[in-house]
Every structure is written in C-alpha cells, then in structure tokens.
Amino acid sequence: MTKSTRVASILTHDDTYPFGAVVPPIYQTSLFTFESFEEMEDSFRSLGLDGHPMYSRGNNPSVQVFEHKVAALEGGEAARAFSSGMAAISTAILARCQAGSRVLCVECVYPDAFKFFTQLAPRYGITVEFVDGRDLNAIQTALPGATLLYLENPTSMVFRLQDLSAIANMARAHGVYTIIDNSWATPLYQRPIEHGIDMVVHSASKYLGGHSDTVAGIAIGTHADIEKINRLEYSVLGGKLSPFEGWLLLRGLRTLNLRLEAHQKSALEIAGKLERHEKVAKVNCPGLKGFAQADLAKKLGGITGLMSFELNADREGIKRFINSLEYFKLGVSWGGHESLVFPIALGLLNRGALNPYDYFGIPENTVRIHVGLEDVNDLWSDLETALGRI
Ligand SMILES: *Cc1c(COP(=O)(O)O)cnc(C)c1O
C-alpha cells in the first residue's frame, strides 16, 4: 500500500451507515439481542472478531470500525482495541507466555512495560532478559530458548533504533514470537509487519487518537493471532474499549497524516536549533543528520514530535529550565496537539533496580519534549528563553 492509499483508507469506508451518515453512529449499548433461537445460535457458533455483536466486552461496532482501519493501516489482517496501551501490551504478552517462558526485551523500553516484565511477570514464572536493541549480535546470542522478543522502535525516552527486518529474520529462525510497540512512528512512518514482525501494539492515547482526550490501545496481527487473544485473554481480562472512545479515535485518525506532517516539520526545526545551542549537550532525534544510527533512521517514513536532549546543567539548572517554559507544559504523555516537557530527573526520584531510568542508565540531565501543533516560532522562543535561564 502506498502512503496515499493508506491515507485514503483512513478517510473512506466500505460500510454504509444509517441515513447515509458520513460518520458512524456511536453504539452506546452493552447488549445486542436476537430475533430467534436460531439467530442467536448462529452468533454463538461464529463468536469471534467479526461475529454479530452480542455483548460489548466482545464486539461493539463503534470499536470494530476503528479496529478495521488500524489493521488496514498496519498491513495486518485483524486488530483488537483495548482500554489502554498497557492493556493491549500486557494482554498481547500474556497470550504468548506461560510459566517458564523467557522473554527478551529491548533496553530503554517504555517504563510501564518494564514494570510489567520486572514486577508482574516474575510472579507468574515468566522471566525477562534485557538486550541492547542496537546490537544484533547480543540479540542473536540471547534468542535461543526465548519465547518472545519485545521491541519498541525507536525507544521513546532516548530514541534508540532497532533493525526490524534483521531482527525479525533472526527471531523467526529461532521460533521466537515478536511484538513491537509502534506508538511513536504510527503505521504512517513504520509498518513493522512488512518487516516480518508478528504483532504490533500501540498506545492509541498518543498519535492515533492525537487529541489528548482518550486513553486507549490496540494490537494488530494475523487473524489467527488476534482471534486467539480475542477468545481467551481479551475476553477474560476484559480490557475493552468503550464505544465512545472508539468513535473519538476514529475522529483522531482522520487527521493523522496532517498532524504528523506538522509535528515533524516543527520538530526538525527545533531539533536542529537545539543541536546548535551551547546549553544542549546532545539531541536524541532520529531526524538529525548527525544521529548515531542515521542509516536505520532512513528506514523510517518520517519523524514525529517526540524527542529528548541532554542539558548542560545540574539539577538546579534543569529546574530553572523547566519552570521557565510557558508553551511546553510539564506532563508525562505526548501525541496530542499540545507541547509537553518531561525531565527524566523527576522519573529518577525513586532510584534502584526497579526504576527503569536508573536501570537503563538514562542520564539525569535528559529532558524529553513533545513538539505540538502550536506556532513553531513561539515554541522555539519559549525554549530559547528557558535555556537562557539555566
Ligand atoms: C503511553 C505509552 C504506552 C502506554 O499506553 P497507555 O495508553 O498510557 O496505557 C506504551 N508505550 C509507549 C511508547 C507509550 O508512550
């Protein structure tokens, strides 16, 4: 699928909605009823992703439209939406593991995925080993005997890239299932299934939704793999998405292409200016020419608004920088219209082996920003003023 057909597939649909409505209705109902014994019998027999809706913990049409669109965008056969990115991630992982499973996970992974692997999974006899996702030899060495390899490309704190095709080939050769968090790139800039990755997960709270008004997740894969999750882990863990949120996500999806282009344009300008600023020691942004993994970065269809950089500052300097910002609001999430800043120094408050930033050695002077849709000149003058107060 070319990029323009992908964008078209967000905007068009094969379904017809009542009265020719251009936007699907919100099926705000928990329950769907049947005319007869036989009709309900049919539904029970075919109960699955595409079956006649019966109960909204199973299928709801407002959610199914969203699932179909994201599955098509990712080049997957099917998708299942969840009440959060973490619900999608934890459910997808649990569906592949059992007591005794060994999971490989790339370093610098999203903090709550780290917490899942290091604190929850061990209680069920699942062990984790972290590998440097940039090091193909390290991955090759760790693969034999593993059940699952969990990726995030790029990692969303320090933006390390993985060679997806090479890794997918090695994992396949060892019968290791691969799951990737694609929240940052979105299917417009990276389609992991085309590289041979088995399952894609998203925090739809970020770019897919794009308006900071919904927490949601989605998993995409083959029909068989999603159906397997659907029949057991999804249905018994129950992390379903609400119909209204499915509808909100569809609304967000319609402008994904336009939003990403705008984020990227401003982000590139800001990354370049940060790189040349004396108070900035290093910029972690795959769009920069001097990016350490520039060759792998070329495989991305684009960059988005999320990046990080290291300040030439001590803790007091970081504090002055953060408190001087006006457009960049202090907050943890990203992917919406608004510009945000998050100092890793705050993430490091409770240090130790259970703290992901500490565990992965992310420097305390690292600051992550999300470049929003505001005027880029305003954003840069905000950053420049704050850098001047360090
Ligand atoms: C936010 C985030 C998640 C978790 O998603 P929620 O929707 O908050 O549960 C997972 N991965 C990445 C990279 C994220 O930024």
Image (tube, helix red, strand yellow):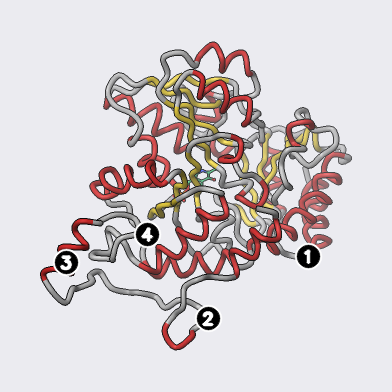
Q: Earlier in the sequence, mark 1 or mark 4?
A: 4
* Quarter assignment of residue 136: top right
Residue marked by disc 4: 241
Name which of mark 2 and mark 1 comes first in the sequence: 2
User: Mark 1 and mark 3: span between their CA atoms?
Assistant: 55 Å
Badge 3 density bin: few <14, some 14–19, many ≥20, Cα 10 Å: some
The answer to whether mark 1 is within 8 Å of ligand 1 is no
Return the disc, 1 or 3, that comes first in the chain's sequence: 3
* Image quadrant containing the C terminus: top right
What amino acid does circle 4 point to?
Leu
Q: Earlier in the sequence, mark 4 or mark 2?
A: 2
Mark 4 in CB contact with mark 3 (< 8 angstroms)? no
Question: In the rendered image of this protein, does residue 348 appear above or below residue 171?
Answer: below
Q: Taking 168 as reference, is 148 left or right?
A: left
At 85% across and 36% down in the image, what residue appears? 289
Please tell me which residue lies in front, 374 or 268.
268
| Residue denoted by label 2 | 22
Sequence-first tag of 3 and 2: 2
The reply to whether callout 4 and callout 2 are in contact (CB within 8 Å) is: no
Q: From the viewer's perspective, is 113 left or right of 211?
A: left
Which x, y percent locates residue 308? 69, 40
Residue position marked by numbered label 3 in the rendering: 40
Q: Amino acid at mark 1?
A: Asp
